[in-house]
Image (tube, helix red, strand yellow):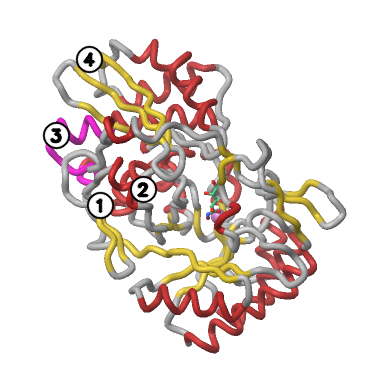
Amino acid sequence: MKITDVKVIVSSPGRNFVTVKIFTDEGLTGIGDATLNGREKAVVAYLEDHLVPILIGRDPSRIEDTWQYFYKGAYWRRGPVTMAAIAGIDTALWDIKAKAAGMPLYQLLGGASREKMLCYTHAQGTEISEAVEAVAEKIEQGYHAVRAQVGIPGLPAVYGTDKSATNVAALNNLPHEEVWSTPKYLRHIPKLFAALREKLGDDVELLHDAHHRLTPLEAARLGRDLEPYRLFWLEDTVAAEHQEGFRLIRKHTVTPLAVGEVFNTIWDARLLIEEQLIDYIRMTTVHAGGVTPLRRIMDFASVYNVRTACHGAMDMSPVCLAANLHLGLWAPNFGIQEYTPYLPETLEVFPGAWTAKDGYLHPGNAPGHGVEIDEALAARYPYERSYLPVNRLEDGTLWHW
Ligand code: EZ4
Ligand code: CO
């Protein structure tokens, strides 16, 4: 088999998505997600200018060699743009291989390790009472695990609580700016989880995302203060470039820790996994460089009792979600999958075989990863320039968003 053509499709059915579609001389096609939220066009250029010209003519069955060719062969390795571009190609090639075999992708990976996959969704409120109501609503809808975020008294809406601010088309051509205070946050968050346990009891799994804003000592304090409420996890406490920082957090709290949604390679997570400093690795197909490396990372993590928890917010397309679900159905160390229901227009552009029911997900049994793109419909939603917000301390200092 030979690759005859590659299309990079940019579409904005509710938000921007970059999709790689690979065509073969045997008529089989495959698609992969290459979306990098707020930097979409950089990935498009990387693909169109540098990867696509040398992809045409290759044998699509040689997935490992193609991955190594683009990873090692670039000399300038790693980074989110490079890895999202490689992921788009790699995921499309696995889609083709599984379609050629007439199997759902999880069968090629080793078969199902479970019947269904636990997911968690998001709930938030400006006030604690509103956040508690929002979590209760998700539980009523059938979810068993919910990530809870709440507004902080004295601050305008912060991460996870102001939906309108997340990935909006640029306002006056500039990203939206948020305001942050770590001391105010650290004092308030334990009150949210006290109220949640009071209202919902012990059977519900509760999660929280600190979105990289704390120092290791602050993270240790928050983890310790949240211990009475038995969180499923505390996510992205610190900016994880400094992996050693997790040693301090780990020494001081038994609250389970999750990190990794912004990681691009196994090297970003190696020390965290080897030293068992985290409980869940959040790397996801599109930002980890595809199915090939994420499978390797999941296996590596399984040796150290670290479980999988792929990033699955709405800015990863349904193609990425499907790939995560195939990997997760196989992975012996599957932990949980993040899931926030897509907008109807997103699902129309990306029809798929995966299902979400009663708080559990399944990739379905269609050959490949099971998601297709309606190209004609995609063309009706042109790219819209947009940014993630930025974040400043109350004195104006630029902070982690
Ligand atoms: O901010 O996907 O756990 N989920 C998250 C997300 C990320 C966005 C960034 O594009 O932290 O909401
Ligand atoms: Co997160």
Q: Position of residue 108 (x, y in %)?
A: 22, 41
x 71%, y 75%: residue: 188
Please say if 240 is above or below 289. below
- The residue at the point 69 percent across, 77 percent down is 225
Q: Find numbered disc 1 in the image and state the secondary structure of the residue it sits on.
A: loop
Residue 267: give x, y in percent of width and height: 56, 38
Q: At 26% from the left edge and 41% from the top edge, which residue is drawn?
A: 371
Is residue 275 located in the magenta-colored stretch of the structure? no
Which one is closest to the eye, mark 1 or mark 4?
1
- Magenta segment main secondary structure: helix
Residue drawn at point x = 42 percent, y = 38 percent: 12
- Where does label 4 land, which residue? 2
Q: What are the residue bounds of the magenta stretch?
A: 94-107
Q: Earlier in the sequence, mark 3 or mark 2?
A: 3
Which residue is tagged 1? 354
Q: Is residue 12 above or below residue 342?
A: above
How much space separates mark 4 and mark 2, taking CA atoms? 27 Å
- Which one is earlier in the sequence, the residue at label 3 or at label 1? 3
**Residue that numbered label 3 is attached to:** 101
Distance Cα–Cα, label 1 vs label 4: 28 Å
Which of the labelled discs sits on residue 240, or is there none? none
Q: Amino acid at mark 1?
A: Trp
Tag 4's secondary structure? loop
Q: Amino acid at mark 2?
A: Leu
Q: Nearer the viewer, mark 4 or mark 2?
A: 2
Q: Quadrant of residue 19?
A: top left
Q: Nearer the viewer, residue 17 or 58?
A: 17
Marked residue nearer the N-terminal end (1 or 4)? 4
* Kind of residue sitting beneath label 4: Lys
